[in-house]
Image: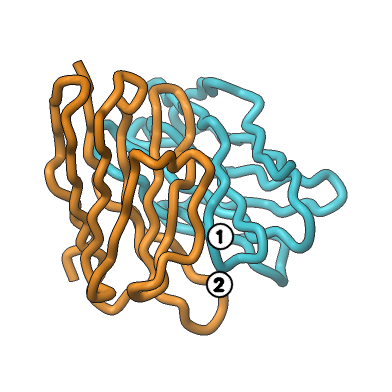
Chain colours: A cyan, B orange
Amino acid sequence: AQSVAQPEDQVNVAEGNPLTVKCTYSVSGNPYLFWYVQYPNRGLQFLLKYITGDNLVKGSYGFEAEFNKSQTSFHLKKPSALVSDSALYFCAVSPGGYNKLIFGAGTRLAVHP
Amino acid sequence: DTGVSQDPRHKITKRGQNVTFRCDPISEHNRLYWYRQTLGQGPEFLTYFQNEAQLEKSRLLSDRFSAERPKGSFSTLEIQRTEQGDSAMYLCASSFDGRGTDTQYFGPGTRLTVL
């Protein structure tokens, strides 16, 4: 079965420190991978995606993600966290890339001043 | 371009009533998706359209659920005989099926509460 796992319900980090939000996936074929962020009372906002090519993908608001095929992972990273980064982060995979997204359960990121 | 819009933003209904939600996609987008999100979970796919054709439906979409996109623009999602288990956030997304893999852009959602 195709699935996405986000092993941490919550990640706590101090402002200015680097952050990592983990994601692993299980999908047949080449995966198309996405990260979205959800702020309270707002919809999901697209951050970045991996389709092919360079394993390090850069996205919005200084976020980046590293695709690792051997570990089937797509971890989200940011070199220096901001308090305003506090939100719910979702990893998603699109089997084949042209249809539905399969989401993880989400990871709540809390950045403390 | 104002993004994906959904109406209403909130809906409270009594069990057994019918409800209908509307989604207006980004204007040039030809694909439209519906997802459902319950508390503490990621969104789950329900169905999607390319133009006016409904191309895939999840088994989550019971026969009480129906979605339409009559002219390939806005879409409606109707739930008949609502049940308490239907309480959730219903999200709409749209994308443009062009070159490369399309990115889905989401609306703010409609929160349904069934009493």
- Name the side, left or right, on which B114 lies relative to B37: left
Q: Is residue B114 above or below residue A30?
A: above
- Where is residue A15? Give x, y as percent: 44, 29
Q: Residue at x 65, y 43 (%)?
A: A75
Q: Amino acid at mark 2?
A: Thr
Q: Amino acid at mark 1?
A: Lys
Q: Alpha-carbon neighbours of circle 2 within 10 Å: few (<14), some, or many (≥20)?
A: some
Tell me the mark number nearer the camera, choosing from 1 and 2.
2
Report the chain holding disc 2: B
- Name the side, left or right, on which B57 lies relative to B34: right
Asked if marks 1 and 2 fall on the same chain, the answer is: no
User: Which quadrant is the N terminus of chain A positioned in?
Assistant: top right
Q: Badge 1 is on which residue?
A: A49
Q: Is residue A56 above or below residue A84?
A: below
Is disc 2 placed on a helix, strand or loop? loop
- Cα separation between marks 1 and 2: 10 Å
Q: Is residue A13 above or below residue B24?
A: above
Q: Residue at x 25, y 37 (%)?
A: B80
User: Which quadrant is the C terminus of chain A positioned in?
Assistant: top left
- Where is residue B32? Give x, y as percent: 36, 63
- Residue A93 visible, this orientation: yes
Q: Quadrant of residue B3?
A: bottom left
Q: Badge 2 is on which residue?
A: B101
Q: Quadrant of residue A23?
A: top right
Q: Are marks 1 and 2 in contact (CB under 8 Å)?
A: yes
Report the chain holding disc 1: A
Residue lying at the far top of the rendered structure: B115
Between residues B37 and B62, which one lies in front from this camera angle?
Answer: B62
- Where is residue B87? Give x, y as percent: 30, 25
Is disc 1 placed on a helix, strand or loop? strand
